[in-house]
Image (spheres, rainbow, N blue to C red):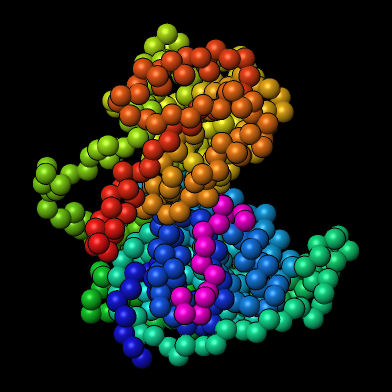
Amino acid sequence: MQQLLLLGDEAIAQGAIDAGLSGIYAYPGTPSTEIMEYVQHNEVALSRKIHSKWSANEKTAMESAIGMSYAGKRAIVCMKHVGLNVAADGFVNAAVTGANGGLIVVAADDPSMHSSQNEQDSRFYGKFAMIPIFEPANQQEAYEMTYNGFKFSEKYGFPILLRLTTRLAHSRAGVGQRTLQNENTLALPQDKRQFVLLPSIARKRFKTLLETQAKFEEESENSPYNEYFDAKDKSLGIIACGIAYNYLMENFPNGCPYPVLKIGQHPLPRKKIERLANECKEILVLEDGFPFVEEQLKGFFEKFKIKGRLDGTLSRDGELNPNKVAVALGFVQVLGKPIPEVVQGRPPMFCAGCGHIDVYNALKETLKEYGDGHVFSDIGCYTLGALPPFEVVNSCVDMGASITMAKGAADAGLHPAVAVIGDSTFIHSGITGLLDTVIEKTSITVIISDNSTTGMTGGQDSHAVGRLVDICKGLGVEPEHIRTIVPLKKNHEEMVRIMKEEFEYKGVSVIIPQRECIQTAGRKAREKSKKD
């Protein structure tokens, strides 16, 4: 096997390509972004013309992947954990429709919220949908689970969920590459009504899903990813899920003295767990995320002592690491040397020359006569408007919520009610909220700070480029209240004037400051210079 040095994200992408992938669908979101980007730049993927365009949001990505599976080809859809909330409708129903071509859903969770709003654990979605969940412990397993996952999906006719966390997604290791497979040929489902979820059909499909659970459980019992390592000291049994197995073994370089059950495939291998419970006095559960396995074990063994996140042995919040595992094992905590001040964490800040800076300078001045508490923001670089020196942003809940929260506040009587959203986030999930405000003629001002990219995740293409004004017109915003301007210091007074005028308008107004992201502009300039 050829050895490659890959991120966990890249290992998933390479495994999908080598397995005969025909399409990848995604919306950028840390820590999953690099999966799509790897496919977009891979020579084999380019030569095969594997579909690898960004979707408007995770819901459209999920549904497009289902469509490719319907056509008999292998598809993968990738998102961060909160993106699975957006895709949940299609995701859960895909477990009922089933799959034709192999279908893998990748959810990259972010324990410790390095770049997220919550620590949500996507394994609960997989259990809720009643589909198999795969959880790699390392980059090689990430590759293998993807490479073999399509065949598994096609064997049983259902999608699978592949769940990883930030540390695995963004760390590198050697990966052995397997034989490149041909893509599937176009082949529609034998049952032409399989994907028609009318109640009469859905009830039959749901029974099929229920009947397949026993086979999923049997697969887990025999899975190479669920491995039992015996040991002499039976005072403790350890269950280590995914990357938590690595954290455990870092504390035992010469081998763990306790029996260990390494879990990488769900549903849980109950027979292996029963063996551990029968042989050991108590069980410690190590899992990066919520107490997903621990809660299930308490249902299996009501009187058995189970330790983990629920009983305080491990903290309920934050990602695991070798230190936390050491403390759970009763070892002395090793914190390492103090971090030098020069490298200590500092609050994030806008890039020098960012157009959002000029937008917020104008907004802050305009709001002086109204006071605090009027600005609802969204997910993007511009959320930094909540921090010094601006401190004008009063909300950031989920993608698109700036417009709808501003609407709700305006309905309650707040004036002005201002929404600040980026161009990519507006396309993702702001459009429908703006439509609500237009229909009801709500008195709000929407500022779409347009930097012509999906800036926070690295500068991916935005569907909004060159389309924002037409989209707003199409939604019914009055053309005279769609204002565009270039956010520069020299235009500061004009921006303030426009904001004051639109704040006082008793209806829906949209202000679009338009200037390309300083990072993508610089990148393009460097690329042009190299070509020249």
184 in relation to 370, above or below: below
Measured as percent of width and height from the top left, residue 263 is found at: 47, 73
Where on the picture, by quarter, is residue 139?
A: bottom left
Inspect this view and state whether residue 208 appears: yes
524 in relation to 245, above or below: above
Measured as percent of width and height from the top left, residue 10 is found at: 39, 71
Q: Nearer the viewer, residue 387 or 458?
A: 458
Q: Is residue 38 magenta?
A: no
Q: Is residue 89 left or right of residue 229?
A: right
Inspect this view and state whether residue 390 appears: no
Name the residue rendered at 60%, 77% in the picture. 74
Measured as percent of width and height from the top left, residue 276 is found at: 47, 76
Name the residue rendered at 47%, 14% in the picture. 500
Q: Magenta region, mostly helix, strand or loop?
A: loop
Looking at the rendering, the stretch of residues picked out in magenta corresponds to 46-60
Name the residue rendered at 79%, 81% in the picture. 190
Where on the picture, by quarter, is residue 125?
A: bottom right
Which quarter of the image is occupied by the C terminus?
bottom left
Q: Nearer the viewer, residue 158 or 324?
A: 158
